[in-house]
Image (tube, rainbow, N blue to C red):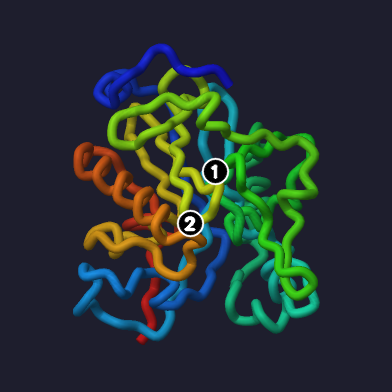
Amino acid sequence: MAKSKQYKTWEEVFQNPHNIRVESLNTGYISGTEKGMFNVYSEEYQNQHTFKSAKLPVLSHLISYKNKYYLVDTGFDSSFSQRWGGSFKGLLRSFLLRNHYLQEDISLGVEKQLEARGITPDTIFLTHAHEHCAGLCVFDNRIPLVLGKYERDICFFPFIYSTNIKSRKNIRYFDFSADGIEMPLLGYCIDVFQDGSFWVIDTHGHTKGHVSYLINGIDRTVLITGDISNNSLGFAIGVETGSYNENMVESKYSFDKLRKFAQSYPQVKLIFGHEVPGLFQIEYLD
């Protein structure tokens, strides 16, 4: 990927929107904990409501642009409605993931939803691994997979692990040091299609290779945060993801820059790692 030579500010980018659209799909649910979803030790979180567990949508995002379709994350394939843990592997898969990864109907599987629309993705992009790429196994290996340079499968072999990324034959990695340009507020970004329509942002911290995406559409501009911010409440009050992060310091840095960007450009619509406000909401359980 070559560096973009056209844009240096977000004002320039937003003055030149494109006919690019994003539709979010809900492929199932995971259960979450308060300490995992929120940094409960931050000052901003004090006196917030507490909850025992939460039911979080597992999302995939369908991008349409120039007569092609792209996925950002896959979410669950339909195997998650047929066996505990779906595409995950390991001796303790069923035990550890029982009632934790849920899919209430086979039709929620990402491949079933795309089949119903008659769509085959041209490329699959990831924010990161975890359950966000659990449905990779149902897609043709020839479809390119593009993700952060240091992103890897979950691996606690032999107890619970995934080979969804490792088993792909056509993998490309975002290399911000080689291909990125430094943009205001967000730091290193890559102009993926070289026309200002679709940007990837270096937001490592939740995982080593975590990235976020910006879609610069005519109808709306959308920021897909990934799990740097998995919910709207934390983003609103300034509290980053909690113990689910691999590196709390780097995650906080990435979270803060996304939040400053969103505050500077309030016209940008937000899609969180497990929540699309007004469409797919997190259910907090007392």
Along the line of sight, the residue nearer the viewer: 268 or 185 = 185
Q: Residue at x 55, y 17 (%)?
A: 2
Quarter occupied by residue 20: top left
Along the line of sight, the residue nearer the viewer: 180 or 20 = 180
Label 1 vs 2, first from the N-terminus: 1
Between the C-alphas of marks 1 and 2, the distance is: 17 Å
* Dot 1 amino acid type: Val
Along the line of sight, the residue nearer the viewer: 240 or 164 = 240
**30 is higher (above) or lower (below) than 186:** below
Q: Which mark is residue 242?
A: none
**44 is higher (above) or lower (below) than 201:** below
* Badge 2 element: loop
**145 is higher (above) or lower (below) than 76:** above
Task: Indicate the quadrant containing the N terminus: top left, top right, bottom left or bottom right.
Answer: top right
Along the line of sight, the residue nearer the viewer: 21 or 166 = 166
Quarter occupied by residue 158: bottom right
Position in image of residue 211 (x %, y %): 49, 44
Of circles 1 and 2, the one toward us is 2
Position in image of residue 263 (x %, y %): 20, 44
Q: Residue at x 40, y 68 (%)?
A: 242
Please name the residue that numbered disc 1 is placed on.
72
Q: Residue at x 58, y 34 (%)?
A: 174
Tell me how many marks there are: 2
State left or right for residue 254 relative to residue 154: left
* Dot 2 amino acid type: His
Residue lying at the far top of the rendered structure: 5
* Badge 1 element: strand
Q: Residue at x 73, y 53 (%)?
A: 164
Q: Which mark is residue 206?
A: 2
Position in image of residue 72 (x %, y %): 54, 43
Q: Residues within 10 Å of mark 2 (few under 14, many from 20)?
A: many
**196 is higher (above) or lower (below) than 226:** above
